[in-house]
Image (cartoon, rainbow, N blue to C red):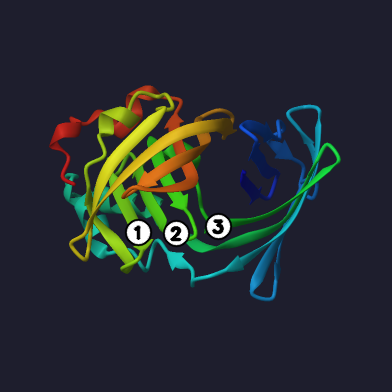
């Protein structure tokens, strides 16, 4: 069983995701946008924990109710302040520098984004059948300015189990063709990505890859191998269809150990913008 959910609060609408993968079948909320205050999904902070509750129809006809609590097992990891500065420096080094470039860099600043590992414990009631669960989980939160149409394309890989947690994030902007960050939490503690060999061509086709694989070099000298296989997914749409985001539940093998997680990939409607049409083999990593 796997679950992902998202509540995006805007001044003019609420963006809602709810998806459950249970017994090899995906159940998902079909309506993406709701009026302010009309979301069937609620997310609330209660002390140090977070609660989620949902009641609605999945797949058009399946009655579902979710009531669960997220309990953190580690402090939050902030993508702005915790990631090594060399990752941003490498992205900047790929571009031509001038006054206009540094002015445009402000378009990728101003948003707080963090992740936190923990457990999601609660109950799913599906068509009247109660199902108790306790799942390893990652809470992903961001706030601040986000212009989806300013993004060319992106990839987010996240996997979690009781023994490990993995993240790899890649985004391409008009001002910066490639920005890559990542981390891995395992038996040797938390370590950050220094370099990875993901084949950019695999994620530059405008389609969801069925499988992805990479090696990631960490700041302690360890190299981990990662394989991801898509199980099921949902496509979401932003800013009047200018950007499409494919959220997929995936099975991961990380150094021989199995995890569940997310293979998220997104594309701007203008395909000629992917990676700014750069020669992918010449990009510094």
Residue 110: assigned label: 2
Give the vertical position of 12 relative to 223 (above or below): above
Whether pointer 1 and pointer 2 mark residues with C-beta atoms closer than 8 Å, the reply is no
Is residue 53 left or right of 141 when viewed as pictured? right
Residue highlighted by disc 1: 184
Q: Name the secondary structure under disc 1.
A: strand
In the image: residue 20, left or right of residue 159: right
Mark found first going from the N terminus, 2 or 3: 2
Residue ID for mark 3: 136
Residue shown at the point (22%, 60%) measured from the top left: 86
In x, y percent, where is residue 124?
Answer: 75, 48
Q: Earlier in the sequence, mark 1 or mark 3?
A: 3
x 24%, y 46%: residue: 215
Q: Which of the 4 quarters of the picture holds residue 219?
A: bottom left
Kindly indicate whether the residue at mark 3 contacts the one at mark 1 (C-beta within 8 angstroms): no
- Residue lying farthest right? 128
Assess disc 2: are there few (<14), some (14-19) or many (≥20) residues with their C-alpha within 10 Å of its C-alpha.
few
Whole-Å distance between the Cαs marked 1 and 2? 25 Å
- Quarter occupied by residue 87: bottom left
Label 2, label 3: how far apart the Cα atoms are: 30 Å
Asked if one can make out residue 78 in the rendered structure from this viewpoint, the answer is yes
| Pointers 2 and 3 in contact (C-beta within 8 Å) | no
**Residue 15 rendering spot, x and y as whole percentages:** 66, 43
Spatial CA distance of label 1 from label 3 is: 15 Å
Residue 263: percent from left, percent from top: 45, 39
The answer to whether residue 245 of the structure is visible from this angle is: no
Camera-nearest label, 1 or 2: 1
């Amino acid at each position: 069983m796997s679950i992902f959910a998202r509540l995006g609060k805007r001044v003019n609408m609420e963006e809602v995701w709810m998806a459950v993968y249970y017994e090899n079948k995906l159940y998902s909320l079909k309506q993406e946008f709701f009026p302010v205050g009309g979301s069937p999904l609620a997310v609330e902070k209660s002390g140090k924990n977070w609660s989620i509750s949902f009641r609605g129809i999945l797949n058009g006809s399946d009655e579902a109710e979710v009531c669960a609590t997220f309990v953190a097992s580690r402090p939050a990891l902030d993508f702005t302040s915790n990631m090594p500065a060399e990752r941003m420096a490498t992205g900047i080094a790929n571009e031509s520098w001038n006054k206009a470039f540094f002015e445009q860099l402000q378009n990728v600043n101003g948003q707080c984004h963090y992740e936190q590992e923990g457990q999601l414990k609660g109950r799913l009631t599906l068509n009247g059948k109660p199902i108790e669960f306790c799942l390893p989980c990652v809470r992903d939160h961001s706030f601040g300015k986000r212009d989806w149409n300013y993004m060319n394309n992106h990839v987010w890989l996240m996997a979690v189990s009781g023994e490990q947690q993995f993240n790899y994030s890649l985004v391409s902007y008009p001002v910066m063709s490639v920005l890559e960050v990542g981390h891995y939490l395992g038996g040797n503690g938390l370590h950050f990505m220094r370099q990875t060999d993901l084949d950019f061509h695999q994620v530059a086709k405008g389609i969801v890859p069925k499988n992805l694989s990479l090696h990631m070099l960490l700041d302690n000298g360890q190299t981990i191998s990662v394989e991801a296989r898509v199980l099921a997914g949902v496509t979401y749409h932003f800013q009047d269809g200018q950007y499409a985001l494919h959220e997929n539940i995936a099975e991961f093998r990380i150094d021989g150990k199995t995890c569940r997680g997310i293979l998220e990939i997104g594309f701007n409607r203008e395909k000629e913008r992917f990676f700014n049409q750069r020669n992918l083999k010449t990009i510094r990593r």
